[in-house]
Image: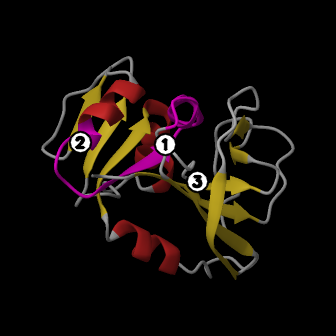
Amino acid sequence: MRKIILFIAMSLDGYIADVNGGVGWLGGEKSGENDMASYAEFIRDIDTVIMGANTYEQLVTELSPDEWMYPDLTSYIITHHPKQPTERIKFTRENPVQLITRLKAQAGKNIWICGGASIVNQLIQNDLIDKYYINVIPTILGDGIRLFDTSGKEIKLRLLQTKSYNGITDLVYERRQIPGC
């Protein structure tokens, strides 16, 4: 069965974007020296990416305005204002929990949750994320869009791996299996 995987960067104080929704702070201590080995390893087992409309807009306007960053993946954009789909980019109003449940039952590789915070927290609340790849960026924002909603339920995780490079720390966790379940 396909796994649901969160792969996302956050500031040391837990934000995925600044107060204006920007991510210009992403990066390590030395500009241009980010090791993408963790991403390359992660993406091999992915064929689907899911994101919210704000994440999509950030990708197409700020991070990669000239070309779609994920041409080899089927992309689902959860939005209240669907646009015309392409062969690989699908816009949907579907509830994130229902979409994930439907896609997980289909054949394929793992599913990447790219953002945003609202979608991530709905999936956490419904215990649907199997693995967490968190890239901790050496920046304290002080305010912004928080990755984890602190009013949620407890999810026990098991640390699988840590890696540090250029001031960035990659943390990989999986949901702990509860004996007898």
Placement of 181 over or under 85, stated as above or below: below
Q: Position of residue 24 (x, y in %)?
A: 66, 55
Q: Which residues are magenta?
A: 103-127
Q: Position of residue 40 (x, y in %)?
A: 41, 75
Disc 3 crowd rating (10 Å Cα; few below 14, some 14-19, many 20+) is few
Q: Residue at x 47, y 48 (%)?
A: 114
Splitting the image into 4 quarters, where does residue 91 fall? top left
Spatial CA span between label 3 and label 2: 33 Å
Splitting the image into 4 quarters, where does residue 46 fall? bottom left
Q: Earlier in the sequence, mark 1 or mark 2?
A: 2
Residue 24 seen in the current view: no
List the single residue furthest toward the left. 87
Placement of 144 over or under 4, stated as above or below: above
Q: Position of residue 123 (x, y in %)?
A: 50, 34
Spatial CA span between label 1 and label 2: 36 Å
Q: Nearer the viewer, mark 1 or mark 3?
A: 1
Q: Earlier in the sequence, mark 1 or mark 3?
A: 3
Q: Residue at x 56, y 50 (%)?
A: 179
Q: How is the image coloured?
A: secondary structure
Q: Position of residue 4 (x, y in %)?
A: 40, 49
Q: Which of the two residues, 66 or 162, is positioned nearer the viewer here? A: 162
At label 3, the amino acid type is Arg
Q: Which of the two residues, 60 or 78, is positioned nearer the viewer here? A: 78
At label 1, the amino acid type is Cys
Check disc 2 and report the residue beneath it.
89
Check disc 3 and report the residue beneath it.
176
At label 2, the amino acid type is Ile
Q: Is residue 123 magenta?
A: yes
Q: Residue at x 68, y 30 (%)?
A: 153
Check disc 1 and report the residue beneath it.
181
Disc 2 crowd rating (10 Å Cα; few below 14, some 14-19, many 20+) is some
Disc 1 crowd rating (10 Å Cα; few below 14, some 14-19, many 20+) is few
